[in-house]
Amino acid sequence: MAREKIRFTITSADLQSAYICDCQKWIRHLAANGLKTDDLHRLISGRFPAGKLFVLDMLEFLRKSDPHLDRFLTGRKGIQQDDHLSIDYAAVRQLLNQEFPELVVRLTAGDQAKTVVKRRTGSVDLAPLSPLTRKR
């Protein structure tokens, strides 16, 4: 039996069924081909991708090589609206750092850019807001 590398978990809302599969092949495919970089950036940051398309594409990609996943999804009639989806973010970061360090540098370079906040010169009259700050 293959050892799981990156755990992707589907848990039903009523906690009656759950399935864990290895999505390493999908993450490696995205990184090697430079696809869905926004979603990869979210995964590196420890957040789940916002769009459902990421999950649907991943499941279709993995179903071809994982008959157990295919059977699980067929039995449940796919992903339900209230299912809880999770992924092992640390394993995603570890895989990308080891095999695709240049992609990680490119994805995280945007985060490290300094944000410049320009302040107005002079002072601002806050008198119109004073009635709003009084306790009632």
Image (cartoon, rainbow, N blue to C red):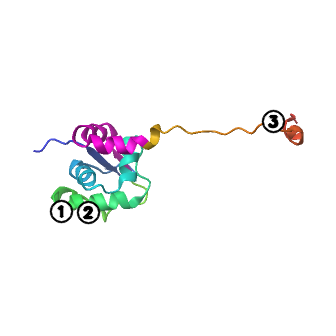
Instruction: Establish if 85 lies above or below 95.
Output: below
| Nearest the eye: 20 or 103 | 103
- Helix, strand or loop for disc 1: loop
Q: What residue type is labelled 2?
A: Glu
Q: Name the residue under label 2.
A: 60
> Which residue is drawn at the image coordinates 31% and 45% (left, top)?
103
Query: For the stretch drawn in magenta, what is the main secondary structure?
Result: helix
Instruction: Establish if 61 lies above or below 17.
Output: below
Q: Mark 3 points at which residue?
A: 122
The C terminus, quarter of image: top right
Side (left or right) of 89 relative to 70: right
Q: Which amino acid does label 3 sit on?
A: Gly
Are the residues flagged by discs 1 and 2 in contact, CB closer than 8 Å?
A: yes
Q: Is residue 122 visible?
A: yes
- Helix, strand or loop for disc 2: helix
Crowding at dot 1, Cα within 10 Å, few <14 / some 14-19 / many 20+, comes out as few
Q: Earlier in the sequence, mark 2 or mark 3?
A: 2
Give percent across and percent down for residue 121.
Answer: 77, 37
User: Marks 1/3: CA distance?
Assistant: 64 Å
> Which residue is drawn at the image coordinates 59% and 39% (left, top)?
116
Side (left or right) of 58 relative to 129: left
Are the residues flagged by discs 2 and 3 in contact, CB closer than 8 Å?
A: no
Point out the stretch of residues depicted in magenta: 84-109
Give percent across and percent down for residue 18.
Answer: 30, 49
Give percent across and percent down for residue 110.
Answer: 44, 43
Crowding at dot 3, Cα within 10 Å, few <14 / some 14-19 / many 20+, comes out as few
